[in-house]
Each structure stands twice: as C-alpha cells, then as structure tokens.
Amino acid sequence: MEYDDLPPELLKQLSKRTAEDRIAAVIDKPMVVDEILIALWRRHKVAYKRQFIVNKLYRMANSGRIASVDGRKGMYEPVDARIEALKGDR
C-alpha cells in the first residue's frame, strides 16, 4: 500500500507499518542491505538510517514476512522465493 499521497495529519493516525510495507515491496529478489536502502530511495525517495532498516529486516524475517538467505549474512529475499526453492528440493 502506498502512503506518499496522504496528508501528514492522516499519516500520524496510521500505524507505523509504512516502513515494513515499503521494505516488503522493494524486496523482489535476494538482496543485501545496501541494495534495499538504494531501492527504498529510488522507489519512495526516503532515506532510512541503515540500523533502522537492519532492525526492521531482522524483525520481518523472524515474523515470516521476508526470509533470510541461508549462509548469507545480511541478505534477504521474498518469502515466495523461499517457498519455490523448497519445492525444488523435493
């Protein structure tokens, strides 16, 4: 869901899920943190602090919203990609 066109008064009333929604929207393949930061800037023109994004990615991976790539520190992928990879292992 896009929030860019909403007025500030309304944004203050919404839950703080916008960063997670934006992160989930830009992760369309396995990506490292640098790539995610760049994609967030290019798509939403928002410069998040690296530590904020790293914390969000960690929490999103733990909740199952995105997946951490096995054996690759700081790399995340959409959950759909993980499901397809598991199907291929059968």
Image: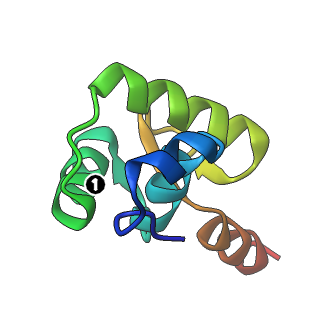
Taking depth in this image into account, of 52 and 36 the one nearest to the observer is: 52
Q: Residue furthest front?
A: 9
Q: Specify the quadrant that holds the N terminus.
A: bottom right
Task: Tell whether 54 sits left or right of 17.
Answer: left
74 vs 86: above or below: above
Q: Specify the quadrant that holds the C terminus.
A: bottom right
Task: Tell whether 79 sits left or right of 52.
Answer: right
Q: How many marks?
A: 1
How far across and how far down the image is residue 35, in percent?
Answer: 24, 51
SS for tag 1? Answer: helix
Crowdedness of circle 1 by 10 Å Cα count: few (<14), some, many (20+)? Answer: many
**Residue at the (62%, 47%) spot, across then down:** 14
9 vs 42: above or below: above
Identify residue for label 1. 40
**Residue at the (69%, 53%) spot, across then down:** 65
**Image quarter for residue 5?**
bottom left
Taking depth in this image into account, of 36 and 48 the one nearest to the observer is: 48
Inspect the image, locate mark 1, and give the three-letter code of the amino acid beneath it.
Leu
**Residue at the (53%, 52%) spot, across then down:** 10
Taking depth in this image into account, of 26 and 79 the one nearest to the observer is: 26
Task: Tell whether 82 sits left or right of 49.
Answer: right
